[in-house]
Amino acid sequence: MADIKALLVDDEESFRNTLCKRLTRRGMTVEQAGSGEEALERLKTFQPDVILLDVKMPGMDGLTALHKIKEINPLVEVVMLTGHASMEIAIRGMELGAFDYLMKPVEFEELLYKLEDASERKRHHEDRIAARAGSS
């Protein structure tokens, strides 16, 4: 799990801070953003493997942020997180390229597994691209 870089995007500061501490203890490099707009700014200087993105935030919502994130970095994996269950939002997120969708409150071990899985998928895509570039 070491070497995973994650960006936590959620307007609930206490949730972000607690999760950041727990993930850092597990060896991840973690940065935080309190809004979709702030997440886009962070991506100018921080290249995460995976982004944990809250769906419902003031200002730019998670689906809009997801769309913009994928425009900036199509390989980054995004796990959507929400306390507001909606199958329509989940489907839309997957259509926009989200890796998966989790409901709050989420068990820490389940979240950890999703972040590891998403990071592994990103590395797999990067390896395939590198292999193609090497064979041309």
Image (cartoon, grey):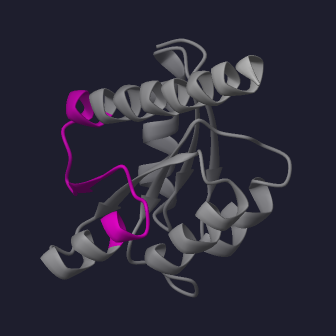
Q: Residue 37: x, y in percent?
A: 69, 74
Q: Position of residue 96 (x, y in %)?
A: 43, 69
In the picture, measured across the screen, residue 90 lies left or right of residue 21, that is: left
Residue 9 lies within the magenta run = no
Vertical order, 114 against 63 (above or below): above
Q: Is residue 20 above or below residue 94?
A: above
- Which residue is drawn at the image coordinates 63% and 72% (left, top)? 68
- Looking at the figure, which quarter contains the C terminus? top right
Q: How many marks?
A: 0
Examine the rendered structure and indicate whether residue 96 appears above or below residue 19: below
In the image, taking residue 120 as reference, residue 131 lies left or right, namely right
**Position in image of residue 42 (x %, y %):** 76, 55
Q: Is residue 97 magenta?
A: yes
Q: Residue at x 67, y 62 (%)?
A: 39
- Position of 133 with respect to 116 (left or right) is right
Which residue lies at the image location 58% right of the left edge and 35% below the top edge? 49
Residue appearing at x 62%, y 63% in the figure: 69
Q: Which residues are magenta?
A: 93-111
Most extreme residue toward the front is 136
Residue sitting farthest toward the bottom: 59
Q: Does residue 51 lie above or below 9 as drawn? A: above
Q: Is residue 113 left or right of residue 44?
A: left
Between 115 and 129, which is closer to the camera in this rendering?
A: 129
Query: What x and y, as percent, mark residue 55?
Result: 38, 72
Q: Quadrant of residue 63?
A: bottom left
For residue 86, say whether it is visible.
no
